[in-house]
Image: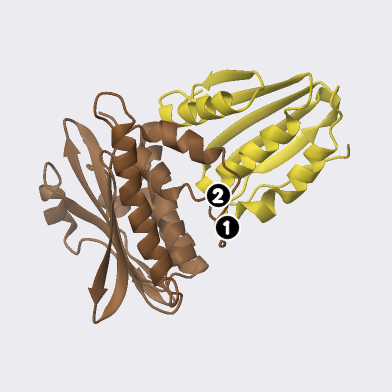
Chain colours: A yellow, B brown
Amino acid sequence: MGPLHIASTVKTPEIQFIADEARLVLSGRSIPENAVDFYRPVLEWAQAVPSDFKLTVQVQLEYFNTSSSKCLLDLFKRLEASDALEIQWFFDADDEDMLEAGEDYDHIVGVPFKFVEVDPEA
Amino acid sequence: MSHFGQPHSVLYRKGDFQTCSMFTHPHPARAAHHVGHRWSELMAFKGLPTGQNLDGLLSSLEGLVVQRTEDRRVFRAIIECVQNLERHAAPDCPVLFKLMGRVVDGGPRFCIRSLNPIRTGDFDQVSQWISNYTELQHWASDALHEGEVDWRTLYRKWLGQPSRSSRGGAGLGWVSLARLSLRPPVLRIIHVGGEPNLFFSVEVACGG
């Protein structure tokens, strides 16, 4: 399992694996027209995560389009085999759509989700 | 101050692009007077559906509509609508895009409309979409609670399916838009100058 760092752009998120904290962080916005190409290296990285690796995935997205939504599901499903995976889904207070989006994944993926409400003013 | 009572410099800016025009109400003060219960045109765009033009449109629209966290809902709908244009509109013909707004019970409502020539060779596919979409509404109406279309259940079902469109879409766009909107989006083929165009309209509320 190697390093992973993709810098953000106006339409794509920053994705970073922080190895010493065992955290994979996705932050920003994910609205590329074709998300498959963008997420390919992330999915390849996820393929190499050992099943006994204790990993925390933090999703801190402001927007994601439907093209990205399937890629996120692919990512969660690839990591689902890990015995010690937790997904932390961040959402801004008053952004009920983002909370519902996290609940949708929680419903589909067999991994514990933790919902973290963030005060956007803080 | 209402959501639309923001400085005119934000609500009514003009923009020029290489191959399109983007404009808003020519008389901001008059438009501001009418912002209320009646629809006011906030932005209109006519141009080729190139990545550059549509990125510029998205950027302008975000600044226009997202003034509170709750307003992200309408920008989410706008992203899907604009990216559908980039994916599916005929690339060498101008598309029309319009955003209108009004205030209902203290909360902003937005109407997003687009009209685009259908790509050569895509007519049958688009007709099939509309047929599927109509069927979906009937199917969903039968499957529901208390007469309301359960778009969320449909969205979850489709999200879990592995298929993708040939142009990178997730095949979730219409369901996603229906979920964000006040009522099912309107999707129909209109012939303009003898050419088939896809008309799309959706109305989104962003809280009070």
Q: Which image quarter: residue B105? A: top left
Depth check, front residue: B199 or B64: B199
Q: What is the x, y in percent for residue B178?
A: 34, 42
Left or right of A46, for residue B103: left
Residue at x-position 42% and y-position 77%? B19
Residue at x-position 55% and y-position 49%? A67
Assign a secondary structure to mark 1: loop
Residue B97 visible? The answer is no
Q: Could you classify mark 2 by the number of other residues whose Cα lies within 10 Å: few (under 14), some (14-19), or many (20 or more)?
A: many
Q: What is the x, y in percent for residue B205?
A: 27, 37
Which chain is indicated by disc 2? A
Left or right of B36, for residue B99: right
Q: Are marks 1 and 2 in contact (CB under 8 Å)?
A: yes
Q: Identity of the amino acid at label 2?
A: Ser
* Residue ID for mark 2: A67
Asked if A90 appears above or below A15 in the picture, the reply is above
Q: What is the x, y in percent for residue B180?
A: 36, 39
Residue at x-position 66% and y-position 40%? A74
Depth check, front residue: A5 or A57: A57
Asked if B93 appears above or below B181 in the picture, the reply is below
Q: Could you classify mark 1 by the number of other residues whose Cα lies within 10 Å: few (under 14), some (14-19), or many (20 or more)?
A: some
Q: CA distance from mark 1 to mark 2?
A: 7 Å
* Residue ID for mark 1: B168
Q: Are marks 1 and 2 on the same chain?
A: no
Left or right of B125, for residue B114: left
Which chain is indicated by disc 1? B
Q: Identity of the amino acid at label 1?
A: Gly
Q: What is the x, y in percent for residue B121?
A: 45, 76
Left or right of B33, for residue A72: right
